[in-house]
Amino acid sequence: GALLALLPLYAASGIHSIQPHERAVVRVLGRIQSDPWGPGLHWTLPRPFAEVLRLDAARLRSVSVGTPAAPTNVPLSDENLWRDGVLTARANLIRARWAIRYAIDDPVAWVTSADSPLAVISNELRRAVVRSTATMELDAVLRSDIDVLRERIEEEVRRRLGQHRLGVRVERVEAVELAPPFAVATAFEDVTRAAQEKAARVEEARRYAARL
C-alpha cells in the first residue's frame, strides 16, 4: 500500500520545466532521443530509466588556447616558451593567445558527436592558429595584417568544426595576445619605434618637398 501511494510522486518526478533559454536532450533507456525539448513542461520516464541533459543554448561560450601569462623575465632558453610559442614564417617565435566564441546550435549533435567536444574545439583552434601563423611574416602577424590572420584562422576553424558536426555556431575568433617572446620584447619595441619614426620623417620630407 505504501509503495502504491508513492507511485504518483515517482511518476511526477519525470516532469521537467525547460526555461526559455534552455534546450534539453533526453536519454531514455540509454538511447538519445532525436528531438530535443524546447521551453515548457515535458514529461519522460523518471530516473533511472531516463536522463535529461539541459543546455543553455542562448549563452555564448568561449575557449582560449596559446601561450599562458608569464613574468617578464622568462629567458629564451625556457622550455615552456618553446613549447607554447607559435612560429611565424622564417621560424620566428611569438607569444600568441587566441579565443573562440561559439554557441550550441544543435543540442543533440553536441551531446553525441564527440566524447569531449570542448577538447575538439580547443584542438582545432590550436591547429588553425599554428597553420595560419606559419604562413605569415613576423611583422605582418604582430602589426600590419592582424585582421588578415584572424580571418584565416576563423575560416579554418569554421570549416574544421563543420566537418566534426559538433552542433556549434562559431561567432568569432579573437586575438587575446600577440607579442614577441618576453626576452626580446624590449628590442622588438625599439625596432618598431625606430621604424615608425623613420616613416614619420619620410612623410614629413615628402610634404616639405611638395611645398617647394
Image (cartoon, rainbow, N blue to C red):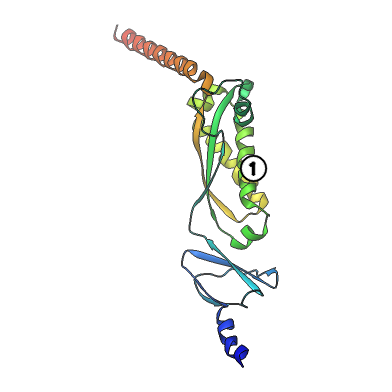
Can you give x and y, in whole percent of width and height, for residue 170 in the image?
55, 49
Residue at horizontal 65 percent and vertical 52 percent from the top: 116
Can you give x and y, in whole percent of width and height, for residue 113 in the image?
67, 57
Identify residue type, mark 1: Asn
Quadrant into which the C terminus falls: top left
- The part of the image, by quadrant, that contains residue 160 is top right
Of residues 4 and 17, which is closer to you in this image?
A: 4
Instruction: Name the secondary structure under disc 1.
Output: helix
Q: Is residue 10 above or below residue 57?
A: below
Check the image and name the residue furthest to the left: 211
Q: Is residue 181 above or below residue 154?
A: above
Q: Is residue 82 left or right of residue 59?
A: right
Residue at horizontal 54 percent and vertical 32 percent from the top: 96
Check the image and name the residue furthest to the bottom: 1
Q: Which residue is mark 1?
A: 123
Of residues 156 and 91, which is closer to you in this image?
A: 91
Quadrant into which the N terminus falls: bottom right
Q: Is residue 114 above or below residue 141?
A: below
Check the image and name the residue furthest to the top: 212
Instruction: Please count the marks in the image.
Output: 1
Q: Residues within 10 Å of mark 1 (few under 14, many from 20)?
A: some
Q: Is residue 175 left or right of residue 47?
A: left
Q: Is residue 145 left or right of residue 78?
A: left
Check the image and name the residue furthest to the front: 2
Residue at horizontal 53 percent and vertical 27 percent from the top: 141
Of residues 78 and 32, which is closer to you in this image?
A: 78
Can you give x and y, in whole percent of width and height, for residue 187 in the image?
49, 15
Can you give x and y, in whole percent of width and height, for residue 153 in the image?
58, 38
